[in-house]
Amino acid sequence: MTAADLKAVGAMTVLLKDAIKPNLVQTVEGVPAFVHGGPFANIAHGSNSLIADMMGLRLCDYFVTEAGFGSELGAEKFFDIVCRTGNLIPDAVVLVVSIRALKRHGEGTDRSALEKGLKNLEKHLENLSWFQVPFIIAINQFTSDTNEELDVVEHFCLKKQVPCAVVDVWGKGGEGGIELAGKLISLIHNTPSRFTYLYDLNLPVKTKIDIIAKKMYGAERVAYSVNAESDLKLCKELGLENLPICIAKTPYSLSDDPLLLGRPTGFKITVRDIKFSAGAGFLVPMTGKITTMPGLPSQPQSEFMDIDKNGNIRGLS
């Protein structure tokens, strides 16, 4: 099914005439930022438009772009899909972690849960190592975090010989990220990137999926439904086998089961369907019970936004 089949080419072109151009906005501290596209990394590639990335790279010395969720989703897709498409070579990666998330993966709220949750972080570090790009850990500080808990994570990073910095941009604005920025710049200049892709596009589709599932997720094997096997045959008939892979998977677990926390082992990834995003240029294996229609909160942030008669805006921060 194409836009032409729906007789929507003209209407879509009208909408895209201006929408294709990245939006240059500023943060509450006046820092320039591009806002252009926002696909979720659990069901799509998880990063903003390549146009915005290319513009940013031409306009500043250091350009930071976000890849959503964990290393097994946003980072892998950014490297294997976005960087491949745009011929980009990333200089460094900032892996954002929080005490709260680590405790969740440790299935508790105390220090022992935090220490148990570090196994999940360890897996993400291993994932990033496959791409041979230097990385640094940003510990996103919450007001509920104790110094003892922050020390636990910092000690873990020291043991793994990975640079890290505690970040409190939420509480202090840009000032709360100065240490991270300094360490990141030092990392870029002192540790060269040897960026490489995870898989070769010419490999069979099943092999590419297998590589991602085993190296990124830690799966033991991949199982395919009857529908998925049928999709694979159609993929071959349509000549789409050499496209990159964009797996749709829950962001709450390294597996395709959102309840399987920490660093699970011995599990299988189940591919129930494979969707063809031929225009975008990738294949989308649907795993577990993932749905491509994301749920929105019962009370969206837009309800808190307003503007007064003097043009003052509230609700943006």
Image (tube, rainbow, N blue to C red):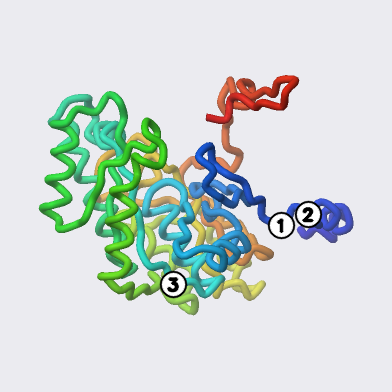
Instruction: Tell me the kind of residue under disc 1.
Output: Lys
Look at the numbered disc 2 and give the secondary structure of its residue.
helix
Look at the numbered disc 3 and give the secondary structure of its residue.
loop
Q: Earlier in the sequence, mark 2 or mark 3?
A: 2
User: What residue did someone put label 1 on?
Assistant: 21
Q: Residues within 10 Å of mark 2 (few under 14, many from 20)?
A: few
User: What residue did someone put label 3 on?
Assistant: 89
Give the image quarter of residue 89: bottom left
Q: Are marks 2 and 1 in contact (CB under 8 Å)?
A: yes
Q: CA distance from mark 1 to mark 3?
A: 23 Å
Q: Is residue 260 visible?
A: no
**Point 52% across, 47% down: residue:** 31
Tell me: 178 left or right of 270. left
Tell me: 198 left or right of 263. right
**Front residue of 20 and 104:** 20
Look at the numbered disc 1 and give the secondary structure of its residue.
loop
Percent x, y of residue 284 = 55, 57
Instruction: Tell me the kind of residue under disc 3.
Output: Ile
Q: Are marks 2 and 3 in contact (CB under 8 Å)?
A: no
Instruction: Tell me the kind of residue under disc 2.
Output: Asp
